[in-house]
């Protein structure tokens, strides 16, 4: 990889931009999860009023109301299934972002130190979305 020509200040500037977008993505995902949860709660159930909650078994502190679990209806079940199916996509987005950032930082820092072997290893780990490898490389220092 002797043909590299990295400008650390340029990498730093791009990482600032990516960091801002990553923060926006996290805020959007958090807001989406909150909204989906609220929608599931507001959707109601297919159960008549008094049967819409079930008393949970177990001790209750003196003066406290018994614990109950609200029944969920078909809309809440569908929303939960949507989130379950999409969970891998959300995790993948976070891992790809983390991998790209860590890989860029580690490869650039190694390049600046003249350690092109480590720089190449970091670059390859980022490309393969090997977040575990990048974290291990960081811990080895």
Image: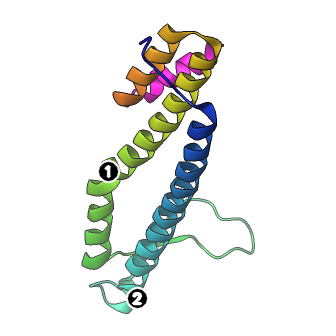
Quadrant in the picture for the C terminus: top right
Q: Residues within 10 Å of mark 2 (few under 14, many from 20)?
A: few
Query: Quadrant location of residue 47?
Result: bottom left
Residue 36: assigned label: none
Majority secondary structure in the magenta region: helix
Q: Nearer the viewer, residue 64 or 98?
A: 98
Residue at the right extreme of this rendering: 63
What percent of the width, then of the height, locates residue 48? 32, 90
Above or below, comparing residue 33 to residue 137 in the picture? below
What range is drawn magenta here? 129-141
How far from the left and from the top, in percent, is residue 9?
Answer: 64, 37
Q: Which percent across, then down, holds residue 53?
A: 43, 78
Is the residue marked by circle 1 packed among few (<14), some (14-19), or many (20+) residues within 10 Å? Answer: few
Name the residue located 52 percent from the left edge and 57 percent from the top edge: 21
Q: Looking at the rendering, which quadrant does residue 95 occupy?
A: top left
Give the mark count.
Answer: 2
Residue located beneath label 2 in the image: 50
Which residue is depicted at the point 61% across and 22% down?
Answer: 109
Nearer to us of marks 2 and 1 is 1
């Amino acid at each position: 990889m002797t043909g590299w020509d990295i400008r650390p200040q340029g990498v730093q500037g791009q990482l600032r931009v990516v960091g801002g977008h990553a923060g926006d993505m996290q805020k959007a995902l958090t807001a989406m999860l909150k909204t989906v949860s609220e929608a599931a709660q507001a959707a109601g159930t297919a159960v008549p009023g008094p049967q819409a909650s079930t008393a949970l078994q177990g001790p209750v502190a003196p003066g406290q109301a018994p614990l109950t679990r609200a029944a969920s209806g078909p809309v809440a079940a569908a929303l939960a299934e949507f989130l379950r199916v999409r969970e891998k996509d959300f995790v993948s987005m976070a891992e790809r972002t983390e991998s790209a950032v860590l890989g860029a930082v580690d490869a650039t820092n190694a390049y600046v130190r003249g350690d092109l072997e480590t720089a190449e290893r970091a670059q390859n780990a980022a490309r393969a979305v090997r977040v575990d490898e990048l974290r291990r490389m960081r811990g080895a220092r």
